[in-house]
Image (cartoon, rainbow, N blue to C red):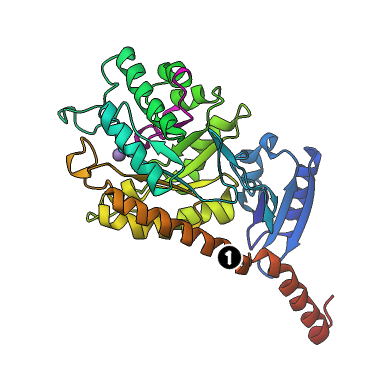
Amino acid sequence: MIIKMQTVATAGEIAAVEARVRDLGYTTGKMIGEQVTLIGVYGDISRLPVDEIGQMPGVERLIPISRAYKRVAQKGDPLKPIRVTVDIGGVTAGGADLVVIAGPCSVESESQIMDAARVVKEAGAQCLRGGVVKYRSSPYSGWEGLGSSDQDSLRRGLELIVRAGREFELPTVVEILDQADLPLYEDAGVACLQIGEPNSKNQALLNRLRETPLPVIHKRGNSLDTEAYLLWVERMLTGGKENVILCERGITSCNRYTRNTLDLGSVAAFHYQLSGLPVAIDASHGTGIRDLVFPLTLAGITAGASVVLVEAHPNPLVAKSDGMQGLFPEQLQGLVRAARETWLARVRTDREYVPSIALQRAYEARMQADRARFFGEG
Ligand code: PEP
Ligand code: MN
C-alpha cells in the first residue's frame, strides 16, 4: 500500500502518519518528491485501518499496489513470469504449442457431432467443443440443446460428444450451466468445462467448480471490466484449483456491426501484464461473422492468446445455433494452418519484447548520476 500525502502536507503530518503505521506493526519507506511525499507500507495490508489512515491530516489517498486477484495474478520474475500450463485430457494449454479447440456451437445429433469431430480432426485441431445445453437469449428460440429437458437428456447428450471425441482422439470441451449437473459432466468423461459468458459472474457455479479436478475455460462476461473479470476467475482458484484458462469472447461496446467487440487490449494485458494463466481467444462469439473469425483469431494470437476456441460445423447453413459464425470445414482447415503460422511468428517475435521494467532502473540510475554530476546532488 502506498500513502500519498497532499502537496501541502507538513513534515509533522508526514511524521505522524509514519509513526502511526509503524505503531500498527508495519515497516515503512518514504519517497520525497518535489511536490508530494509517498509513504510505502510493507506487510499484510489486509489489517491496515484504511479509513483511519485516510482521514489523518495531510493524507491525500491510499493506493493499493498488490492485486486483489492474488492467485490469478502474474508471478515470478517480471522479466520471466511463471506461465501456468493446463492439461485438457492430455493436450497441454499454455505450453510450447498453440491449442485449437473447435466444433459446433451445439451438439445436434449423433451423426452431426460425429461428422463435426471428423472435420475438427482433419483440420488438425486438438480438442472438440460443443454445447449440450444452450443458454439462449430468447425463451422462444425453440432450441436449448439436446440435453435441456432433464438430467437423462443431458447425460445422453454428453455421451454423444464424448463418444465422438474418443472416436477421433479429441478431448472434449463442454459448457456447464448448472452446478447441480457437475457429477454428470465428470462421469460422462468430458475433458474440460466451459463457463459461458452469461455465467461469468455465477457465484454458486464458480464456487462449486473449485472442487472439480476438471480444467475450466472461464469466458469473460461481456460487460466485465478487465480486472473485475479476473476477480471472478480468482473465485475458482481460492481453494487451490489452478487449471483454469481465461477467455476473451468480446465485450459490449457502441459497435453494432459485429456481435461483440473483441477486446484485444485486454488479451495483451492478461498475457503480458496481469496473469500467468493461459488465454483463449474466441473470435466466433467475438465477431458473430464467419468471415471475420479468421483475421480476429490471428490477431488474438498475436495479442497474447495461446488457445483458440472456434465454432465450426459440417454445414453451418443448417446449424441449429450460431450458424452465422460457424466455419465451413474448408475454412477451419485454413484457419488452423494460419493460426499455427501466427503462433510460430509470435514465439519468434516475443524474443524482441522488452518490458519497461528491464530498462527503467538503468534509466533512473542514469538520471541520478546526471543530477549528481550537474547539481552535486547525491
Ligand atoms: C458458446 O460457446 O457456444 C457460447 C454460447 O459462448 P458465449 O457464452 O461466449 O456466448
Ligand atoms: Mn455458440
At x 28%, y 26%, the residue is: 110
Tell me if residue 2 is in the magenta stretch.
Answer: no
Asked which secondary structure carries label 1, the reply is helix
Q: Is residue 231 above or below residue 189?
A: below
Q: Any magenta on residue 189? A: yes
Residue 328 in sight from this viewpoint: yes
- Closer-to-camera residue (325/304): 325
Closer to the camera in the image, 123 or 375: 123
Q: Is residue 138 above or below residue 268?
A: above
In the rendered image, which residue does mark 1 sit on?
A: 348
Residue type pointed to by label 1 = Arg
* Residue 242 pos. (x, y %): 60, 34
Query: Which quadrant of the figure has residue 34?
Result: bottom right
The answer to whether residue 182 is left or right of residue 155 is right
Residue 170 in the figure: left or right of residue 154: right
Quadrant in which ligand 2 is drawn = top left
Q: Is residue 302 visible?
A: no
Bin the neighbour count of mark 1 within 10 Å (Cα to Cα): few under 14, some 14-19, many 20 and up. Answer: few
* Image position of 321 (left or right of 57): left
Q: Position of residue 313 (x, y in %)?
A: 28, 42
